[in-house]
Image (cartoon, grey):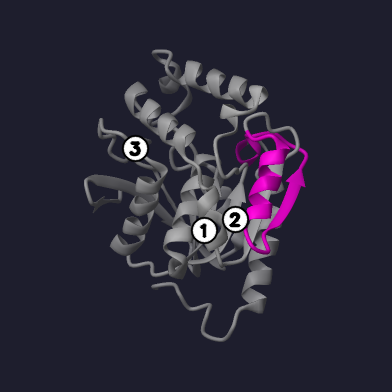
Amino acid sequence: MPRVRVDDIRIYYEIRGKGEPLLVIWGIGGEVPSLSAALAEKVQGRYRVITFDNRGSGRTDKPDVPYSIEQMAVDTVGLMDAIGIPGVHLLGISTGSRIALAVAARSPERVRSLILNVAAARSPDRDDPVAAGAFERLRTAMTQPGFAERTLAHPPTITSFLRQFEALRTFDGRPLLGRIRCPVLIVNGTRDTSVPVGYAEELRAGIPDARLVFVESDHLVARTDPDLLLDPALAFLREVEETAEPGETNTAAE
């Protein structure tokens, strides 16, 4: 099973297919998702799908120290360096969308396009009571002994989940949005209680020329109906490829 040293941790990752690299960053507490298989099948060899477990999740190390979204963005770029990927299309889901935002803002030369799913620039639970309830239900469930073990093959520890949870809740990416220069697509759900629609609209307004698509689903759309995410995402990627300047498409290390 491939793991690679990045600074203070070993990161677990998987690569499927060949072509332009498409890096997927999953959400809080999650592990390399089944979505990667569905995505690899749909791209039909045009993209090389790279997925990995974030710090504190899955088969990646879970140090008992404070985490931050910015640190996990550094982890992401470090993984790209370690496996020889100079540039990627970047898909971030939920907490992964915040990490992807930080990567695109701080390392713009590494990101050809950005797809953000069930995304917001900041934690909605601080201002929105509906989101606060959704966040509290997640925290309560994931900190019950045995719950994560029943739902995930390689669960986080309660401590590492709480480290991720605090990183998510304290992140405010609004100052980063104006620094993003690549094409951006946001795909959010109309029934998402964790990220109410106003937060997606705030995110779109802050990123120059970002495109926002709402789908009739909730926060778990990538798990329960991945085509609602993948269909607009792949159409967007085709458009990015078609409008790229000569020489911009060969960022992949074969």
Residue 116 visible from this viewpoint: yes
Residue 107 x, y percent position in the rendering: 42, 63
Q: Secondary structure at mark 3?
A: loop
Mark sitting earlier along the chain (3/1): 3
Left or right, 193 with respect to 175, comes to: right
Judged by depth in the image, the label closer to the viewer, 3 or 2, is 3
> Is residue 209 within the magenta segment?
yes
Q: Which residue is mark 1?
A: 90
Q: Amino acid at mark 1?
A: Leu
> Is residue 174 within the magenta segment?
no
Mark sitting earlier along the chain (1/2): 1
Residue range (magenta):
195-223
Left or right, 57 with respect to 216, comes to: left
Where is 211 relative to 182, above or below? above
Residues at discs 1 and 2 in contact (Cβ within 8 Å): yes
Q: Alpha-carbon neighbours of circle 2 within 10 Å: few (<14), some, or many (≥20)?
A: many
Marks 1 and 2 sit apart, C-alpha to C-alpha, by: 6 Å
Left or right, 195 with respect to 4, comes to: right
State the residue at coordinates (62%, 60%).
Answer: 184
Q: Amino acid at mark 2?
A: Ile
Residue 199 x, y percent position in the rendering: 66, 40
State the residue at coordinates (24%, 45%).
Answer: 9
Q: Amino acid at mark 3?
A: Tyr
Q: Which residue is mark 3?
A: 67
State the residue at coordinates (44%, 72%).
Answer: 252
Q: Which residue is mark 2?
A: 115
Quarter of the image for residue 15 reads bottom left
